Image (cartoon, helix red, strand yellow):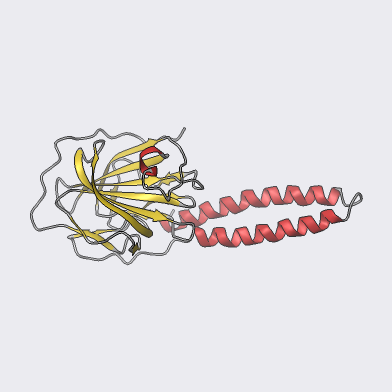
């Protein structure tokens, strides 16, 4: 299965479930037709709402092909959206300590497919259950349901970069299309977050962040950080690979 078809298939499943409930509603309306004609009007309104919902869902699950920059020093955005936080933080599970975090907010109008920021191997994958606080809040990364994807860079031996897919108030499902041991190319699709959500990128302190809060980025295309010429030393903290499991 081509990766760029997975988002479309996910959208079709959502539309299919909505259609099932719509047909149930229409069936009930027809059955009650003999009792009151207003049910027909209600059924038509519901049908119109379903059509609008279907059009929006197909738009939401769009998956454009990224134009990946060729420069090896580039780290590309893992998601489409608005950068609203660039900071130094601590991530112990995979990065093993202090690192840089670039947080991207995805509105319901943004593409919701995530992309690999660098080429490398997936060596860490952990699903963390949690709350569904509004993704507008940057602290949602600490308490919301999320998936942390750790990548050992093949472009710079020893370099670790991580992506965290974070569910939001509306987004209640995080889907990852990779597993531990997979090799990914820069810009390759990693997964999907359904509806409004957030995506965090964790970088070594040696990287130079090239974006600021308030800037919009395109997943797999926008260069959000660059790396210098020196090879980075491997992070000694380490982190064991964990399979992705949903409750």
* In the rendered image, the vertical position of residue 90 relative to residue 64, given as above or below: above
Q: For the point 22% across and 65% down, which residue is it?
A: 70
Residue 145 vs residue 76, the one in the foreground: 145
Q: Which residue is pictured at 82% across the width and 57% down the height?
A: 40
Between 60 and 197, which is closer to the camera in this rendering?
A: 197
Tell me if residue 68 comes above or below residue 103 in the rendering.
Answer: below
Task: Determine whether, in the image, residue 243 is placed left or right of residue 236.
Answer: right
* Residue 147 screen position, x and y as percent: 37, 41
Q: Position of residue 173 (x, y in %)?
A: 48, 44
Q: Position of residue 79 (x, y in %)?
A: 36, 56
- Name the image quarter holding residue 105: bottom left
Measuring from the top left, give residue 37's x and y in whole percent. 88, 56
Residue occupying the point 20% across, 49% down: 153
> At 19% from the left edge and 64% from the top edge, which residue is drawn?
71
Q: Spot the residue most to the right.
A: 34
| Residue 210 found in image quarter | bottom left
């Amino acid at each position: 299965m081509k990766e760029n078809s997975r988002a479309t298939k996910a959208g079709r499943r959502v539309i299919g479930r909505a259609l099932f409930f719509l047909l149930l509603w229409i069936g009930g309306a027809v059955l009650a037709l003999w009792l009151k004609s207003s049910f027909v009007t209600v059924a038509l309104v519901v049908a119109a709402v379903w059509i609008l919902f279907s059009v929006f869902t197909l738009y939401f699950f769009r998956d454009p092909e990224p134009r990946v920059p060729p420069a090896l020093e580039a780290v590309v955005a893992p998601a489409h959206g608005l950068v609203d936080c660039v900071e130094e933080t601590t991530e112990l599970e995979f990065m093993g300590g202090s690192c840089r975090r670039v947080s991207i907010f995805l509105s319901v109008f943004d593409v919701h497919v995530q992309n690999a920021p660098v080429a490398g191997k997936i060596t860490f994958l952990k699903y963390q259950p949690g709350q569904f606080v509004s993704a507008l809040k940057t602290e949602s990364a600490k308490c919301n349901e999320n998936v942390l994807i750790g990548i050992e860079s093949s472009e710079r031996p020893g370099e670790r970069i991580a992506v965290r897919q974070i569910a939001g108030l509306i987004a209640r499902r995080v889907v990852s299309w990779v597993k531990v041991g997979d090799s990914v190319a820069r810009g390759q699709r990693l997964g999907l977050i359904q509806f409004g959500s957030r995506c965090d990128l964790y970088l070594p302190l040696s990287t130079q962040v090239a974006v600021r809060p308030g800037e919009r980025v395109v997943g797999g295309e926008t260069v959000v950080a660059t790396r210098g010429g020196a090879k980075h030393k491997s992070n000694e903290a380490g982190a064991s690979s964990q399979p992705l499991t949903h409750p």
